[in-house]
Amino acid sequence: MKILAVKLPDVGEGVTAAELVEWHVKIGDVVREDDTLAAVMTDKATVEIPSLYSGTVTWIGGEVGDTLAVGSDLVRIETDAEAPVSADLADEPARAPEPEGVVPTVEDAPVTASEKPVAPAGKVIVAVKLPDVGEGVTEAELAEWNVAAGDIVKEDDVIAAVMTDKATVEIPSLYSGKVVRLGGSVGEVLAVGSDLVLIETDAGAGSSGNTPSPEAPAATASKVDAAKPAVQPVARPSPARASAVPANGAPRAEGQPPLASPSVRARAREAGLDLRQIAGSGPAGRITHADIDAVFDMPRRSPGQAAPPGRAARTGTEEIKVIGMRRKIAERMALANARIPHITVVEEVDVTALEELREKLNAGRGDKPKLTVLPFVTATLAKAVLDHPEMNAHYLDDDGIILRHAAVNAGIATMTDAGLVVPVLRNAEALDLFQTAAEITRLSEAARTGKAKRDELTGSTFTITSLGPLGALATTPIINHPEVAILGINKMATRPMWDGTQFVPRKMMNISASFDHRVIDGWDAAVFVQRIKSLLETPALIFMET
Amino acid sequence: MTSLTCTLLIIGAGPGGYVCGIRAGQLGVDTIVVEGQKPGGTCLNVGCIPSKALIHAADEFAKARSFAGENELGISAGAPSIDLAITVAWKNGIVKRLTGGVSGLLKKAKTRYVQGQARIIDGKTVEVATADGPARITCKSLVIATGSKPFELPFLPFGGTVISSTEALDLETVPQKLAIVGGGYIGLEIGTAMAKLGAEVTVVEAAEHILPQYDAELTKPVLARLKELGITVHLSAKAKGLSEDETALVVDLGKDEIDILADKILVTVGRAPVVDGFGLEDLGLSMNGKFIATDAYGATSMRGVYAIGDVTGNPMLAHRAMAQGTIVAEHVAGLPSVWDKKAIPAVCFTDPEIVTVGALPGEVPGSVAAVFPFAANGRSMTMERSDGLVRVVYDPSSELILGIQAVGAGVSEMAGEFSLALEMAARLTDLGDTIHAHPTLGETTQESALKGLGRALHI
Ligand SMILES: Cc1cc2nc3c(=O)[nH]c(=O)nc-3n(C[C@H](O)[C@H](O)[C@H](O)COP(=O)(O)OP(=O)(O)OC[C@H]3O[C@@H](n4cnc5c(N)ncnc54)[C@H](O)[C@@H]3O)c2cc1C
């Protein structure tokens, strides 16, 4: 056994330091070569750092939010593996695992919300992801859960119903096993491809490689390995001994009462957890604190902090560090809002004709991806800026220069697990509707999985933001600095409209556009919005060569 | 009429009611406790505490008597005498201190205390006859904690020579001849004490065993000791009533009927819940036999009405009442508390004492028991009491401990470890591999676990 370090690698583009945004391991964890150790963030992209060795983590190089220099030790691993010749840690092979020479217990380490459910021996935890529910839908709202954590499900059992723009779809389970975590609560909107539920199933069931860890959807396809000792989260002995602790997660026989100490029971009660549904990994099948950690994936709460259910007053505050992507977003938003005096124009648009066209175009598509409204809006924008080049511009306020762009590079505001990301659809003016649709799907998928390349995340000239079915009546979009305008798409609804003689049902959709009032006057803003409105209301105009 | 309002109103300040009141107060619930007699209820005034005081005095007296005769320790002392009136006054002093303590604790928790008999008007209104006249209290939640009273035999009504435990604990002279009807723990505790104080005691028990809810392995040392103390025990015997001249208890022994001469007849045939005479009947709550039916939160069939303690059934024990009181207070305060206890320990302060926690042998199919005797424990020998044993009932496949019992002098103080083992879901190895201080009685617990594991050391 020796201790080898995994260093923060060169994460590209002359980056010299990166911010730790997430730990995938903690001290005492057993990792295998290529398991993801941590995620770090550079200027724009989040990069996952894989392990170079198999072994036990004995030291970690910082806390989430810390910035590490490229080349510094990220984690140290006790391993049998040989260090690469270049590894300069070979100088100090006998280095103590911790600077103070103490092996900290897991309880001393910060318990992060990223702790994974740990599968008992012979079991693996696999994810059922929110599948593509059709029509190029990129997200869906959780309408109903048919299972709860702890339930046993069979393959093809319906686990949830999700609602897209148009339809409610029931999602079946791909595996048989025990549900260990739900991916959200009813009402939450999940991205296609994100984990819907995690299921503990017999080893081998999820060997399709489609079994990513909960924190890294589709990113690394790393199984939560059955070889990991189930008692790990509270393993007090040294890492080497921890792996020798036997796991015993067999479900109890029917009718057998759960075994748990009073403090475990109290914690389960406070968490609203039914102990009968939890397998115990302790001796004689005792349910331990670790088992509860695994199911609920939450840091320990002291009894006093418990939030009583019902009508009782809640007390206490939770501190959440604003780090990583969130900090970037916060900075950019603050900058945009501080510098740009926004003027927002809201207009209603009759999209009945557009919807008819969209339906016709989609009808002949068969299994091919279908069109959403977004490609039409992108095309409209590309057309509208021909007459309004002042809108497709960057205002470099520090330099006192406005740069008008010939290309329409549409930023598509996209919600990801990490927060708002704006991938860029380049040369929207040169793409047809279906190419646009395909490109938007590809980009938003890349953004969601953190795989978007740097040049796919920069260089937008005009940003479009849409919250889909959550789009509300009106929004006040914040301009993506240094752009000068942004277009927000609101929710579509059928409303009664007066046609001069009677009320008729029309498909109506509002648009909310914000402009940089320093360089765009209200008049021009209003004219531009009217142009967009007329194009959307008479979609043939979008495609006319004029 | 005075009117008061509160969130939580508790009727009865016994261990159930006063603990509920303290806990609710701690949680900021506006609470009133109403008590018709004295704070502390049966337990502090006429139950647990007075009986243990009497038992202690009797033990000391018996010890002194043994020193007056030949003894192995070589102590010689004169023949002792006892003035029971002074003993009772001492006991009353302890009771006063404890009941005063309860009032102080309620005050500290900011829970109001109202003295007076309560009468339930409806599920949210109670009228109390206080010294200053009637008071009407309205509340959001009501807790019935009215406890229990001695069960009265129709053919042996209390009065005159026929007494209940309450009077037995307040006697100012030791009766010469004491007949006890009922060989449960209360009768045997008081009977043993009285025998040690010099009374000639006869116990009449209808069942085939004394302490009928325990098995013979546990009761045998107690029975042996009763004999040693000169107590006559009639089993399968039925008390019929007083003899005509009221100097004897008539007992049907099956084949024949005998008269047991007695100047006091103590009837301890169980306790009846206090569930009538104060308007409770009008609520029409669901009952469980003669007890009030409750769920795991202590809630009755009427919304907002709870019941705790002896009114809710067996085992009628103070610590159960306290645990229920805590859960109801927390539930009313919105906490997710629920009855999820694994075991309620029970102690007989007989001589020797008996402790039981959890399953008895044979109660859980497939379980087995490991027994270790105090005869092999050093500490027991140094205390001249090596009768008794510790017994662990466990599941042989998982080693999980299902129950622990003990009989022996001083074993009541071992109850905590037994209960903790059950609540923590301990296995034999957990007990067996825990260092128990030497020389203590607790080593016997460790050894019984080791015996189950096939590696007992001192046998
Ligand atoms: C001799 C003896 C020895 C015992 N020894 C033990 C022992 O060693 N260990 C043990 O655990 N238990 C023992 N017990 C049992 C224990 O005392 C009871 O289980 C316990 O007191 C029950 O508590 P409780 O709160 O339910 O009711 P109680 O203690 O009976 O209290 C009820 C209270 O409610 C009051 N009340 C009733 N009706 C009204 C009304 N309408 N208005 C106002 N107030 C009212 C009563 O005055 C009383 O104070 C013993 C009992 C006896 C008799």
Image (cartoon, coloured by chain):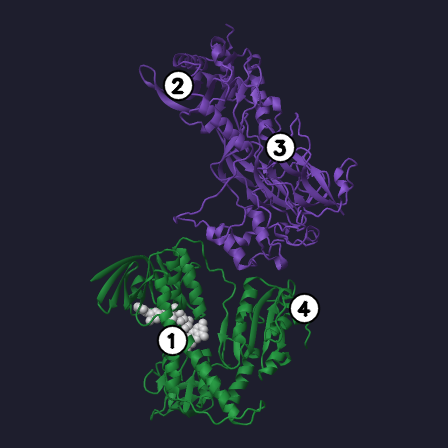
Q: In the picture shown, does residue A7 fall above or below B446? A: above
Badge nearest the viewer, 3 or 1: 3
Which quadrant of the figure has residue A512? top left
In the rendering, at what x and y percent does residue B358 appear? 54, 68
Alpha-carbon neighbours of circle 3 within 10 Å: few (<14), some, or many (≥20)?
A: many
Q: What is the display colour for chain A? A: purple
Do dots 4 and 2 share one subunit? no
Q: Amino acid at mark 1?
A: Val
Q: Which residue is mark 4?
A: B453
Find out whether the residues at labels 4 and 1 contact each other: C-beta distance under 8 Å.
no
Do dots 3 and 4 share one subunit? no
In the rendering, at what x and y percent does residue A321 appear? 52, 38
Q: Residue at x 57, y 53 (%)?
A: A289
Find out whether the residues at labels 1 and 2 contact each other: C-beta distance under 8 Å.
no
Do dots 2 and 3 share one subunit? yes
Q: Quadrant of ligand 1?
A: bottom left
Which quadrant of the figure has residue B443? bottom right
Q: Which residue is mark 3?
A: A18
Q: Is residue A129 left or right of residue B97?
A: right
Badge nearest the viewer, 4 or 1: 1
Q: Which residue is mark 2?
A: A347
Q: What is the display colour for chain B? A: green
Q: Quadrant of the N terminus of chain B?
A: bottom left
Q: Chain of mark 3?
A: A
Alpha-carbon neighbours of circle 4 within 10 Å: few (<14), some, or many (≥20)?
A: some
